[in-house]
Every structure is written in structure tokens, then in C-alpha cells.
Image (cartoon, rainbow, N blue to C red):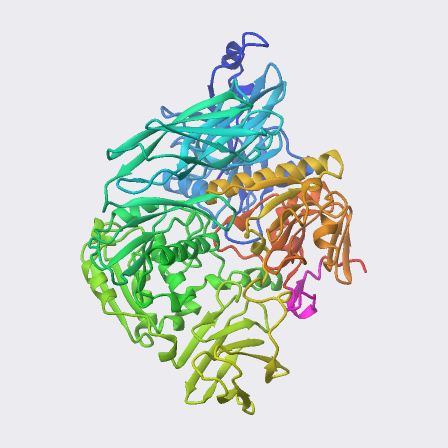
Amino acid sequence: MLRSFIFFTCSLLCVGPLLAQQTSKTARPKPYSFTKGLVALTGSRYGREAIYTDPLAYQLYTGTLQQPVEGAVFGKDEQGADIKWIAVTADSLNRLRLRGGFRGNAGAPAGPGVVAGNLRGGIGGGGGYTYLTYPSTREQIAVLDIKGNSNVYVNGELHMGDVYSMGYMHIPVKLRKGLNEFYVRGVMITASLSFPDKPAMLATDDPTLPSIRLGESNASLQGAVVVVNTSATPLNGLQLISKLAGKTYTTSLPVVPALSSRKVAFTFDGSGVTAKGAQPCELTLVQKGKSLDTGTISVEAVPAGASYSQTFISHIDGSLQYYAVTPQSSATTAPSALFLSVHGAGVEAIGQARAYKAKDWGNLVAATNRRPRGFNWEDWGRLDALEVLSIARNRFKPDPQHIYLTGHSMGGHGTWFLGATYPDKWAAIAPCAGYPTLKEYGSADGVIPETSNDPLEQMLLRAGNQSDVLKLTSNYKPLGVYVLHGDADRTVPVTYARQMRKLLGESQPDMSYYEYPGGSHWFGDESVDWKPLFDFFKWHRIAADSAVNDIDFITANPGISSAYRWAAIEQQIQPLLYSRMQLTRRGKAITGTTSNVALLKLALHDFAVNTPLTITLDGNPAIAYTTSRAQDTLFLRRENGKWQQAQRPDMAQKGPHRNGTFKDAFNNRMVFVYGTKGTKEENEWNWQKARYDAETWYYRGNGAIDILADTDYSLAKYTDRGVVLFGNATNNAAWKLLLADCPIQMERNRIRVGDQQWQGDDLGAYFVWPIKESATASVAVIGGTGVKGMRAASANQYFAGASGFPDFMIFGLDMVRLGSKGVRMAGFFDNAWKLIPEYTAVNSQKNSTE
């Protein structure tokens, strides 16, 4: 979305009411709602890509931002017209909004639709900025609540926003005596301050909870709530005491850093509950026997056979997540089917599950995408779907030949995406009211850019190739595909379904298509629980690997999807360009063609020991191989256009287990490690950026992160855990432990990439590197050569679903103003994690110093 920054100018517009509240230096002010402010459409551009531009942030970072006043000129728009600060006032709902008479920054008439588009749209136009203030009579801590914003600068410190107006972002901030400035990226917002009288608070408005299933064992259930630390020191030794229906349970909690919040898991005993319906569970936050805060959550008890929620600990970050189930309606001892349903934007998994009537032949499981909006079922939403699928398979023990995938709206996209990415996991798929790709439809974060003439931008966009469903359509061929769409859908137009029908019409051997007459985006539960759809599922089954002798599979990233049946693309020739294998198995011969495949793995499980085989690929001479064991595996490597037998690659190389791209480190129960060995400004940025990213991860991914100082990190204590390192080699003591052998070295005033280097304090970087002591975990570096470069790395579009980030990206603070012209270098490591020129793009206009 194009969102505006609002600077709350209480000093200019509303000083009187504020001072009236603060009658003494010791009196705690009453909660305050901002009612006046200034807005300027400054042209910020954020989206599903690594590059962003933000004129106001650039001025803020360079110290050139002038204090806004009404009518003052901020700058020029793309047409050369003045961008002015315009006063806004709150409406009856306390929303700060521009009124209907607004005529645009340049004074040209602009109707309500134009205003809404400029302020809310994400990619196409220019977003806005704003500035307000709060004059405090003393230094104090407050809790800031804003709805409708993307982020907020509080006296220069960056915090996450609440773009979907969910209402659960309670941000503790330290106010200074005198003028406090708030720059909010967002419009149509509400904003308020409250003033806590305790060092910690329980925020119970965003719980993650299981259902109490009557008739089951409920003695040890897990939920999660948010603890807000409103003190200037970390909170250690916390405990959470739960009490439900006379049963109590005490859980020890992790550290909550100073002036931050964390969603924490706790255990509660629901065995005392005997009636269905909402059950109050009392919570008490305790430290050293002293109660800090109390709260109550409502846990739902459901009867046998009803849809329910189930929680689990995610391997992604160690946080508590949930999925929902509509259980099979009839008991059976035979293996049943399993339906994985992926929901639409804004829909909870339990709501998705309840839209389906129970089936007598299988269990329906709804994953969450980490949040109702989450990651569009890409990135960590994809991983959530896979986690839930694995849990459901272990728990329900379904017939492995009867596993199905379906979803609605954003979940329709998820169905197209997950179906094309993992075609061997499903017997059939059914996208409902779905769009195939974020390059065309997009959502709140905008669309993925289609292409670029700039080699650097091309390198960045390549990192998102795995999201382009239209390039993967041949992967659907083994599947049954049922497409359901209302022909009057205005949210996701039926043209997307027709596009896929046309695209698949000549190549898809097994497809059924239905347009519901007069159907809007949601025309009742039949929008997903459509009988012909499930009838279609019923007669589809996953064939055994032994029965599949023809393979045609495409992937853009083996780290996301590498295998289909008995063959796998282990390594690529060109990183993250599309790789394809088309193989045929007949008798004792395997033949076929490949493209962009460097290492191929063949599972020879269906051949007996001592079976002589011939493998012929890409017109090369046949390779003779005799199986040596019952579960034999053969690796073949292509070098200089020739295929030859190879050894199993070392786990230190790239492969499906760890294939890079910057986002790969945000996994394996990652920890955030911030530097403490720099200047005061550097250390503050390192900590604040770690906190901002943790806040964003919580908001977007319902997650929780361990945030550590560099001096508290050790390889032994955090074995096999991903690391996100904030800072550089000069100011982060963990650098030497994790990055001593990395060809990218960044220190104060200098960054070196192989034999190229740049100097200055205004350079930033994002890059990934394998942790040498782990076979699976990686470290992601976020930092710069100085405070200016660090500030350039402040944005975190890597949390936008499907945004493309390569293995490494070097940029200057000028990127915030100029976009891709400010990027110095971007690219990928080779399969041995080495730098080679072929896999990099360099900005020739920004020469390095040798």
C-alpha cells in the first residue's frame, strides 16, 4: 500500500489539552488520543522487492528533515509540483483523515477515489508522510497504540505498525522531556498514548489458543499471550500462572527485553472443564513471587466431533502456532483421506475449518499461514503449511494415496502455488476464487515486479522466481485440478480462473472447471465446501512411486522444492533460474533431458540389488551403473555439458538442505544477535533494528524471537539455530564466530566483496552465509559500514511474502532516494559458496576501489 507518514503536531495544534492533563511532574497522565496532525504525500515506495525509496526517511537519516508546519513545502513530486504538509483532524471515530475537499499536494482536483488510491495503494504511486508531537513534562514511558500504519518513528526510533488495524500492537516507548516526535507511515489512522504504572503488562487481545475437546485429556494444553515490558531493563525470572476451572499451572517464561514485547507460550490445565462454550482462564504474571499484572482469556470448549484448534511449537522460530481441524464424521479403522485447506486473507484457520461440514471419509486440517494475512502462503506461510501437513500426517495416519489440497482467495493462490511447488504431495488440488501469481494480483504489499532492464534489478527479481506459478504449470500434469470461481467475483475477478483454464486447457490432462452463476467472492460455505469438488477429490489418488515412470518437474530453487518422486534437482548451474528435468524410466534404462541442472539425484529404490542400469541424459553417452544395495541412490554431475557419476555432495555445499538466499537464515529457531562493541549510535541502531524486526516478525508471523547481545551468543549454546546478525565486524563480537571465512567482510567505513571494495560510512548490506559448524543453519547479516549505511538497511521488505532477496546485496544510503541506482552489487554464491563474477551484477556507475 501507499501509506502516509503522519507527524502528530500536538505542540503546534493541541498543546493546551496535553498540558492540562499533566498537572504535576509525578501525576500519571491520562490516556491521550491524537486528534490533529499533518499529512504530506511524499512518495514513499515499498513493496515485494528488495529495493525501496522513501524521501522522508532519507531526509530523516541524513539530518535534513525540516520540522513540518502547515503549508510548508516538503519537496517535489514526480511531476515537479510542490508537496505540502496539510492539516488533518480526527473524525468521530478518532481517525486522522484528509477531508473530501482535499485537492492534492499540487492543488489539482482529486476525487475521493484518487485520494484513497494515493494514500492506501502500495506500489504504483507515491505514498505519504506526516509529523505530530507530544510535549511531555518529564521523561517517562508510554505505550503507543496506532492502527492503520506500516511503521512509526518515535524520536527517530523505528517501530512496527498495524497496517491491518488489528489493534494488538502495543509498543512501549520512552518519551523525553519536552517535544516528542512521531512520524507514522499510514493514513486513516487512529493513534493514542497510555501511561503504564507497572513494569510489565499482559496483553490478552492476541492469544494463540487450542480448543478444550470434551472427552479428551486436557491436562496439559499450550497457549500464548503477549507480555509487554514497560521498563528500561530486561525482565528476567518471569512466570505465568494459569487458573482454569479450579486447575492451576505455572510456566517459566523467557526473557523479555527492555521496552519491548514478546509473545510467550504457557501451559494450562483444562481437565476441570466439563461444559462446552467459552471458559475463562485467569492469568497472573509473576516475578520473584510478586504479581506484576493479571488478565483473563477465553478458551473454547467444544464437544466431540466439532471443529477445533490445536497448538504446536514451530520449528521455524520455536513459537507457539495453531492449526484447526474439522474431524471425520464417522469412525473407521481404515486409513482415511486428509484435506489440507489454506485460508484467504484475514481469515482465521478455525473459521476456515468451520466452513466445511464433516466428511465421512477424511479429516480436514486448516493451516494458518502464521497469521490471517501472513505471507500469502509463500516463504514462512509455505513452511507453516508444510509443518501442519507433516503434523497431520503423523497424527491422523491418512491413506498416503488420498491427500488433497484446497483453499479460497489468498488460499486459492496458496493452492496454485503449493500445488505447483510440491506436486507429489497431493492427489488433486482445488483452488477456489484464487489468483495464480503475485506478479499480477498482489495484495497489501503490492505486486511482484514483472521484469526490469536493469541487470541489478534482474538479479534481485530472480530471487523471487519460485513464486511465479505461471512458469511452473507443467508441474500440475500429474494432478487432478478442480477450479471453482464465482462468475460475479469483484474481489478476485473470474478472469484469473479463466486465465488458468486457458493456460492449462491444452496441457492439463485432468482438470474440471466450474463458474458458480452469480457467485460473488464469498457466496456462502459452498464457496469452499462444494460437493462436486470433494466428489472430484474422491476418485483421485496419489500413485505409488514404483508406478510413476515419467517425470516432468520444474523448480527455481532447490532449497524450496527439489524433488519429484524418484528424482531430485540437487544443485543448479545458474542460481534461481528455472531448472527442469524430464525423465523416463523403462525397464533398466533411464533417459531424459535437463536444463539448468548441475547435480541430479536418482533414487533407485525400485530396482533390486546388482541390477545393471543405463542412464542417458541430454544426448550424452550412456552411463552404466549397477545397484549396490536395496535402497540405492545415484548422483550425477554435469560439468562442461557432460554428465558423469558423482559422490554424494558434502553438506557444506549448497543443496536442498541449505541453498541460500538471504531469507534462508530466518528459520531453524533463529536468534537475533545485535552488536554492542561500536559507538553509541551504532549500538543503538543494532539494538533498535533487532527490536523492530522482532516486532515485525510478531505482527506478520505471530512469532517470537530470542534477541541476544553479541557477547551472549555462542555456537555451542545455539547449535544448529539460524542467526540474524545486526551490525558489522567492528561492532558485533559474534562476527568472528560466524563469518570469519566469508568472502564478504564489512567493517566500519569499508566493505569488501571478493576483490572489490567500497569505502565510506554510508554503505549497507544484506547477505547470507552458512554457519560452518552446522549442516543446515545459516547466518543473515543486516548492517552497514556506519550509521548512515545501517539506516539504509532499516527497511525489512524481506518479511513481505514472496519478495526477492538474493544471497547478497550491497547498497548505499542513496538507494533510499534513488532506488536501484543506489545498489552497488547483488548476486549469488556458487554451489561451493564461492564468489564468481558470472553470478553477480555490479553497478558500473558506482565503481569500487581496488
Q: Is residue 208 left or right of residue 492?
A: right
Report the magenta stretch's main SS. Answer: loop
| Position in image of residue 703 (x %, y %) | 49, 43
Occupied quadrant, residue 177: top right
Q: Is residue 314 above or below residue 201?
A: below
Which of these two is toward me, 343 or 722?
A: 722
Q: Residue at x 36, y 45 (%)?
A: 310
Left or right position of 616 against 157: left
Instruction: Judge whether 617 appears above or below 86 on screen.
Output: below
Q: Position of residue 334 (x, y in %)?
A: 25, 63
Span shown in magenta: 829-845
The residue at the far right in this view is: 850
Quarter assignment of residue 80? top right
Q: Position of residue 271 (x, y in %)?
A: 32, 35
The answer to if 838 sits in the magenta stretch is yes
Residue 361, image x, y percentages = 22, 60
**Residue 706 shown in magenta:** no
| Residue most extreme to the top | 23
Q: Residue at x 37, y 26 (%)?
A: 93
- Residue 241 horizontal side relative to residue 511, left or right: right
User: Which one is nearer the viewer's eye here, 416 or 721?
Assistant: 721
Does any portion of residue 185 appear in the rendered image?
no
Above/below status of 458 relative to 94: below
Q: Quadrant of residue 236?
A: top right
Q: Nearer the viewer, residue 775 or 457?
A: 775
